[in-house]
Amino acid sequence: GQQVMQIPQYQHVQEGEDFTTYCNSSTTLSNIQWYKQRPGGHPVFLIQLVKSGEVKKQKRLTFQFGEAKKNSSLHITATQTTDVGTYFCAGNYGGSQGNLIFGKGTKLSVKP
Amino acid sequence: NAGVTQTPKFRILKIGQSMTLQCTQDMNHNYMYWYRQDPGMGLKLIYYSVGAGITDKGEVPNGYNVSRSTTEDFPLRLELAAPSQTSVYFCATKETGDFRSGELFFGEGSRLTVL
């Protein structure tokens, strides 16, 4: 079946260091979404990427969608302790229902 | 405007017991979803609904049932609870269902333990 692979599973960084998480699909995606889940919390939508090669920025966060629409990345510049949490990508393969397939997430910890 | 409300937040069940997780939304969204999240895993879709009176199975529906009698409510029923159903359950909504649509809005989750 359709799968979205996300790496790494864990990332420990010193505050101020950069962080990147990657998602890959074996088949072309219609779009990809990114969510953040704080410890003990619920997933919160960050962004949706739709176009091939799309790059979007939200302050220190940069989101990219690959040219083939099979991979995506989230890059955080100069991490802060408020960035702690698990980041999930969720791929949409199209179809009338548009159900999302979630990656397993990357858990980010930031040491002050 | 409460968004997506789930109850209960925590529950401990004994093996073989049954229970219903409640989910209600006030955003008038047609699409509603139930996910489960196990440690270190992503979210797995259990059931979804595209509108009142319509439900469909997701990736992991076994052991669960749902109903959608109104736009607002989408309860998840667990029959004969098993330890494998220990998980955090999230209800979510979306305004529309096609691939162009946007974000999922999640409830705060219901943590279920089956002993």
Image (cartoon, coloured by chain):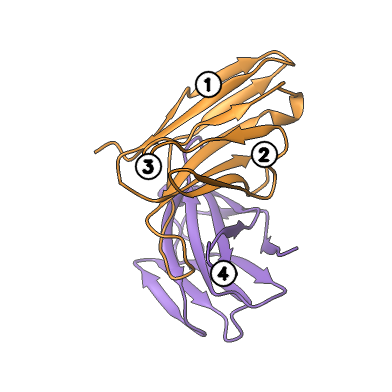
Chain colours: A purple, B orange
Q: Residue at x 53, y 66 (%)?
A: A96
> Disc 3 sits on a residue from what chain?
B
- Does dot 3 land on a helix, a strand or a loop? loop
Q: Chain ID for label 1?
A: B
- How many numbered marks does the figure carry? 4
Q: Position of residue B111 (x, y in %)?
A: 56, 27
- Does residue A39 sit above or below A73 in this rendering? above
Q: Which amino acid type is shown beneath numbered disc 4? A: Gly
Q: CA distance from mark 2 to mark 4?
A: 29 Å
Callout 2 amino acid: Pro
**Residue corresponding to mark 1:** B10
Pointer 1 and pointer 3: residues touching (CB < 8 Å)? Answer: no
Q: What is the chain identity of the residue bearing mark 2?
A: B
Q: Secondary structure at mark 4?
A: loop
Residue occupied by mark 2: B39
**A74 versus A43 height, above or below:** below
Q: Amino acid at mark 3?
A: Thr
Q: For the residues carrying marks 2 and 4, which lies nearer the camera in this image?
A: 4
Dot 2 and dot 1 residues touching (CB under 8 Å)? no
Question: Along the polypeptide, which appears first: circle 2 or circle 1?
Answer: 1
Q: Residue at x 72, y 74 (%)?
A: A26
Secondary structure at badge 2 equals loop
Q: CA distance from mark 4 to mark 1?
A: 35 Å
| Label 4 sits on residue | A95
Residue A90, above or below A73: above
In which image quadrant can residue A8 be found? bottom right
Seen at 53% across and 77% down, the residue is: A65
